[in-house]
Image: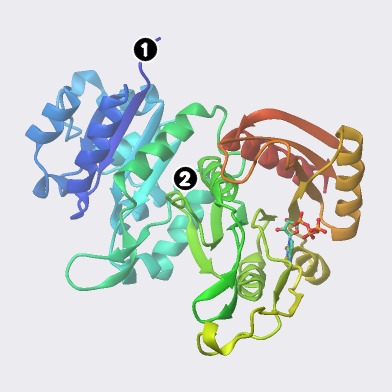
Amino acid sequence: MSPPRVVLGVAGGIAAYKAVEVLRGLAESGHEVTVVPTEAALNFVGVATWSALSARPVATSLWTNPNEVSHVKLGQEADCVVVAPATADLLARATHGIANDLLTNVLLTARCPIVLAPAMHTEMWQHPATQSNVATLRSRGVIVLEPATGRLTGADVGPGRLPEPAAIIAAVQDVLRRTPTGDLAGRRVVVSAGGTREAWDPVRFIGNISSGRQGVELARTAVSRGAQVTLVAAHLAVEPPAGVTVRSVSSAAQLLEAMLTAAVGADAVVMAAAVADFRPEVTATSKIKKLDQPADLNLKLTATVDVLAELVRRRAGDLPVLVGFAAETAVDATELSELGHHKLARKGCDLLVVNEVGRQVVFGAEENEVTILGHEGTSVQVPRATKAAISDAVWDAVVHEWKRT
Ligand code: CTP
């Protein structure tokens, strides 16, 4: 089988030097990469570097070998076009179909998935012009990764950093694995992940062992299917994927607040977080000293808010699809199904992803086995599979719900 053909567009921003790492990673993992730098990009990294690392000629102009019609051929033949960094100017030209250099011509002729990894100053990213361009591109199915937040050129800090090269490579590989693609294009989804912590003094908490892996995979697969994703993260043990907006929370109460805010205008909300059901009634303001205590320490616990139930209770107007997860221990498949249907009815969400815990450990594991229950009595069995494959099955069920309503 011939290697996947990737066009790596590089626009003129300082982060162009990081695109060298993207090129190396893609080339070393068996992709045939053609680099198309803009003229401005060549001020940062020259043709010799791109050509040597890709082991291919580098086309920089519409006027190099016009007999090869490379502006049409490159786009038509690519399996994926990725632009890193995508500057504010590049995003604007891509949005409006301006084709005044080779890279923007490639973007117009490409019929394959397009991944744009923006990098620019925070002000430029947040400008209404850029935000409206990004929204338009996303509505057309272009995958525009959220920029990372951190140190930018100079002393400023904020959203606008190029996502890490490894994360961009992973996004390209995800897209290449997935054909057809883009069925979540133009959709905004919210995923909660990880485990909440309820403090009983400034240094101690009641928590759980959730790694956040399933929620992170849900976010990653949604990005690669074209969605705009907010990940509400409670103490993740794994890195969040590139291209999502991360809102970090700690307790169930903070999770509720973040979910209610993020859910406004969303098309789907998935509660994959393991939320503590109880919290200490009182949180001590200073560290509880062993010497001040009798032999036993009694912590009085009180119920936390049920975030999913609260989302169900408050939803109105254009309803997002609400998905819950349920970890159950059961003696057999029949009991598991009964427990699941009972919980689905109790929670009032649209879909419930039920997994059995106890016999095999699910928390932190690479694989899982689930049943996706629908509120109309539907049941989809997903045999043991990676958490990425489980996530895809969940999004398939969400897409099915959207079509139904
Ligand atoms: N959940 C929530 N808020 C809570 C507890 C759970 O939003 N305080 C959500 C979880 O994120 C999950 C779903 O509810 O999507 C089911 O969680 P689970 O722990 O299985 O159920 P519980 O409601 O806690 O019920 P029980 O522990 O009795 O099984």
Q: Which residue is mark 1?
A: 2
Q: Which is nearer the eye, 288 or 220?
A: 288
Name of the residue lying farthest toward the top: 1
Who's the residue at 62% across and 55% down the image?
A: 189
Q: Is mark 1 within 8 Å of ligand 1?
A: no
Horizontal and vertical percent for residue 54?
A: 19, 27
Q: Earlier in the sequence, mark 1 or mark 2?
A: 1
Q: Quadrant of the N terminus?
A: top left
Q: Which is nearer the eye, 23 or 64?
A: 23
Q: Which residue is mark 2?
A: 143
Looking at the rendered structure, the secondary structure element under dot 2 is strand
Q: Is residue 112 visible?
A: no
**On screen, 294 above or below 31?**
below
Going by the numbered disc 1, the residue's amino acid type is Ser
- For the residues labelled 1 and 2, the Cα–Cα distance comes to 25 Å
Looking at the image, how many numbered discs can be counted on the residues? Answer: 2
Who's the residue at 31% across and 25% down the image?
A: 29
Going by the numbered disc 2, the residue's amino acid type is Ile
User: Which picture quadrant has residue 249?
Assistant: bottom right
Judged from the image, the quadrant occupied by ligand 1 is: bottom right
User: Which picture quadrant has residue 171?
Assistant: top left
Looking at the rendered structure, the secondary structure element under dot 1 is loop
Q: Which is nearer the eye, 88 or 236?
A: 236
Horizontal and vertical percent for residue 281?
A: 71, 83
Horizontal and vertical percent for residue 360?
A: 68, 36
Q: Which is nearer the eye, 141 or 175?
A: 175
Who's the residue at 86% across and 33% down the image?
A: 333
**On screen, 196 above or below 185?**
below
